[in-house]
Image (cartoon, rainbow, N blue to C red):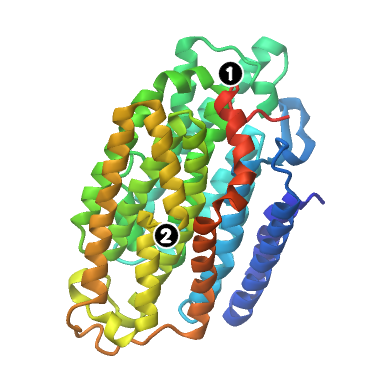
Amino acid sequence: MNILSLIIFLPIIVALFLFFIKENVKLVKIVYIIVTLAVLLLSLDLYINFNPDDSMQFIESHIWIAEYGINYHLGVDGVSLGIVMMNAIIMPLIAIGLYKQRDNGGYWINLLFVQGGVMGAVLSLDLMLFYLFWELMLLPIFFMLGLFGYARSNFIAMKFNLYTIFGSLMMLIAILYIAVVHKEQFGFYSFDLNELKKLSFSSMESLLVFGGFMLAFAIKIPIFPFHTWLSDTYRSAPTGIVIVMSALMAKLGVYAIWRFLFSLFNDTSHLLAPYFIGLGLFGLIYFGISAMSQNHLKRMFAFSSASHLSLIVVGFFIYDIYGLVGSSYLIVAHALSSAALFLMVGIMFERTRTYSIDELGGIARVAPKFALFFAFFALSIVGIPSTAGFVAELLIILGAFTYNIYIGFISAITILIAMLFMFKVISKVLYGELSAATANFKDLRFHELLALIPLALLILAMGIFPNFFIHKIKPTAKYCSTNLEGPCYVK
């Protein structure tokens, strides 16, 4: 079996077997950690053996449903490799950091399904295969929101599900339409990305099909104004799901723009780029200001995450080598920082039973290790020097200045908004007087440190030695930014 198939199906197959022993929660947790660590080892082998000077690699292609041109087609390039690695790194750390918090086997089984779904979606080069993994990724999230969420969890789970189903349905219609057009032009159905690049669409067809895809991706990211599910869902969701949604699923939305829309609808993407750059810049400001006005930690970090995702969208749509590399790098950098920060928020809630910023304070006095890591991860999100976020944001801003001096100036200024609300939360949560909720706050335990230290070290390594990581991304991004036939061509 190809290594990509192993990475996808190992967690899914194990999750199916774990249903038979889900009452033995301790065993389920142990198996979860073993499986996710095995996926991490496989992904590290993939990373080490990946040749940055080549295009799509580790390709696996098999005919699946020949009559309708559906193939099992997988591959990895420099951009998708980063998402594979952050998925592999974050998933075992969730279990290690939250080991004593979740005593329900179904919680961990669903997370294994999510991991397999995300891996499958990011590695798929067949549109129907991508759609199936996209849906597989969403269903466990829906169940976990309803079963393990807080405060009107059933209503919020239905709201999230309706949003995502609507977006997915529009994408499915667009996928089926593309296959029908391929049959009309070439005599057979196909969902394969290589084959579909040969299609010719009228301007109106291209806009409509582009819109079907973009709606699904915009809801998932989310891009303004498709964000209204965001704050309630993050507030209600359990910590593991918040981490997955912020660090992995949202990033898959921007990756899908890169992989499918830029490849299949390059002319339309160029035509609409100024509008999406404008939406991205507006999102940077809007979500940043919204974050500043929040008193609930998870809602504040939800808007913070959306603000940075808006910056990633800007970086992609400026079609510049710096913007493309910076956005790809920020996908990974922000995933690591947001995963760590939401993990710490979950740890904080376990000790204080509150997410209210006003009810917290003085934690640095009683838990210096917790305060150190919390401050580091909060500042790494806003991109302080020597962190991965600084390198990524700097590259995006350079690309924005290359695209348009005013766009570059606005991008640079709006990033300062993130600093304002991060300094606010650090000062209120870590300093000041101890509150009733934090008076007996316990410092980080060993298993929590075991989850946080690798994330901190990786964020520093990516900030101090960026070339070691960027050299895997840059050739793919360089080709994508200069190829007139469309980015990310699959060879």
Q: Nearer the viewer, residue 44 or 22?
A: 44
The amino acid at mark 2 is: Ser
Residue located beneath label 1 in the image: 484
The structure residue drawn at horizontal position 70% and vertical position 55%, both measured from the top left corner, is 7
Where the C terminus falls, by quadrant? top right
Does residue 238 appear in the picture of this structure? no
Direction bottom: furthest residue: 440
In the rendered image of this protein, does residue 398 appear above or below residue 2? above
Residue 404, image x and y in percent? 35, 26
Residue 467 position in % (x across, y down)? 58, 49
Q: Quadrant of residue 66?
A: top right
Secondary structure under the numbered disc 2 in the rendered image: helix
Residue at image point 42% right, 59% down: 338
Q: Earlier in the sequence, mark 2 or mark 1?
A: 2
Residue 454: quarter of image = bottom right
One can see residue 232 in this view: yes
Residue designated by label 2: 338
Residue 48's tag is none
Which x, y percent locates residue 71? 73, 34
Please tell me whether mark 1 sits on a helix, a strand or a loop. Answer: loop
Residue at 69%, 22% in the rendered image = 195
Q: Nearer the viewer, residue 323 or 67?
A: 323
Give me the residue at 72% from left, 13% from top.
187
- Residue 450, by quadrant, is bottom right
Whole-number angstrom distance, CA of label 2 to CA of label 1: 35 Å
Amino acid marked by disc 1: Leu
The answer to whether 177 is drawn above or below residue 148 in the figure is: above
Number of on-image labels? 2
Viewer-closest of 231 and 145 = 231
Q: Nearer the viewer, mark 2 or mark 1?
A: 1
**Circle 2 crowding by C-alpha within 10 Å: few under 14, some 14–19, many from 20:** many
